[in-house]
Image (tube, helix red, strand yellow):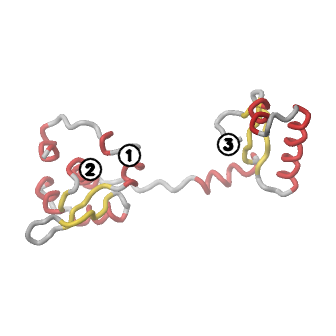
């Protein structure tokens, strides 16, 4: 019953081993009773020719607050620009980011790390061994991407640094 659509009696009977209609009705009645008696916060609803397990309507307002995470604070334009540079050019050093942006980005990089959108993935093999930054899985989730291959193609002149 964990489906976006109601589960039909036919599907339930098949899952439960081709039980007769009468037995299915008994099972559903027993389950409804168990849910109600134990105050589990769930009910079985009969809709659209099938059944679905749903939250009791009286609990929905409380659960909505609980299950809706607070919105993340928006990223500044500097943070978004830095994040884009990292996403397209990764792994990249802070020095490379600052050269591309023409401004210090230490606090921006710190913010992106705190938000778990970027992480340190190693050190560049040059003098000073600067840290290398790359995006995280949380970055992909936050921006609705399956992988970095889903990033839109770069087509404008300011993006030449990103093309490498």
Seen as rendered, the residue at the extreme left is 127
Residue tagged 1 = 143
Q: Looking at the image, is mark 3 or mark 1 nearer the viewer? A: 3
Left or right of residue 8: residue 133: left
Which is nearer the eye, 113 or 62? Answer: 113
Please determine whether, in this image, residue 3 is positioned above or below residue 86: above
Left or right of residue 18: residue 106: left
Where does residue 44 sit, x and y in percent of width and height? 79, 42
Q: Measuring 86% from the left and 37% from the top, which residue is drawn there?
A: 24
Left or right of residue 8: residue 145: left
Crowdedness near tag 3: few (<14), some (14–19) or many (≥20) residues, C-alpha within 10 Å: few
Inter-mark Cα distance, 3 to 2: 36 Å
Residue 87's tag is 2
SS under mark 3? loop
Residue 103's tag is none
Q: Which of marks 3 and 1 is nearer the N terminus?
A: 3
Where does residue 117 sit, x and y in percent of width and height? 35, 57
Q: Looking at the image, is mark 3 or mark 2 nearer the viewer? A: 3
Which is nearer the eye, 17 or 144? Answer: 17
Inter-mark Cα distance, 2 to 1: 11 Å
Residue 2's tag is 3
Q: Which of marks 3 and 2 is nearer the N terminus?
A: 3
Verify CB contact (< 8 Å) between mark 3 and mark 2.
no
Where does residue 154 sit, x and y in percent of width and height? 20, 37
Q: Quadrant of residue 152?
A: top left
SS under mark 1? loop
SS under mark 2? helix
Crowdedness near tag 2: few (<14), some (14–19) or many (≥20) residues, C-alpha within 10 Å: many
Inter-mark Cα distance, 3 to 1: 27 Å
Left or right of residue 131: residue 22: right
Where does residue 73 sit, x and y in percent of width and height? 41, 56
Q: In which quarter of the image is residue 26?
A: top right
């Amino acid at each position: 019953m964990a489906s976006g659509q109601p589960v039909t009696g036919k599907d339930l009977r098949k899952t439960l081993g081709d039980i007769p209609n009468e037995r299915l009705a008994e099972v559903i009645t027993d389950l409804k009773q168990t849910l109600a008696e134990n105050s589990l916060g769930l009910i079985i609803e009969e809709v659209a020719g099938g059944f679905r397990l749903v939250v009791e309507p009286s609990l929905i307002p409380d659960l909505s607050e609980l299950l809706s995470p607070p919105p993340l604070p928006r990223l500044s334009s500097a943070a978004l620009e830095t994040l884009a540079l990292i996403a397209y050019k990764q792994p990249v050093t802070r020095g490379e980011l600052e050269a591309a942006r023409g401004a210090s980005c230490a606090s921006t990089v710190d913010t992106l790390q705190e938000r778990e959108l970027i992480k340190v993935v190693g050190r560049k093999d040059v003098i000073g061994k600067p840290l290398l930054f790359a995006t995280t899985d949380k970055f992909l989730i936050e921006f609705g991407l399956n992988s970095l291959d889903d990033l839109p193609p770069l087509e404008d002149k300011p993006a030449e640094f990103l093309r490498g």
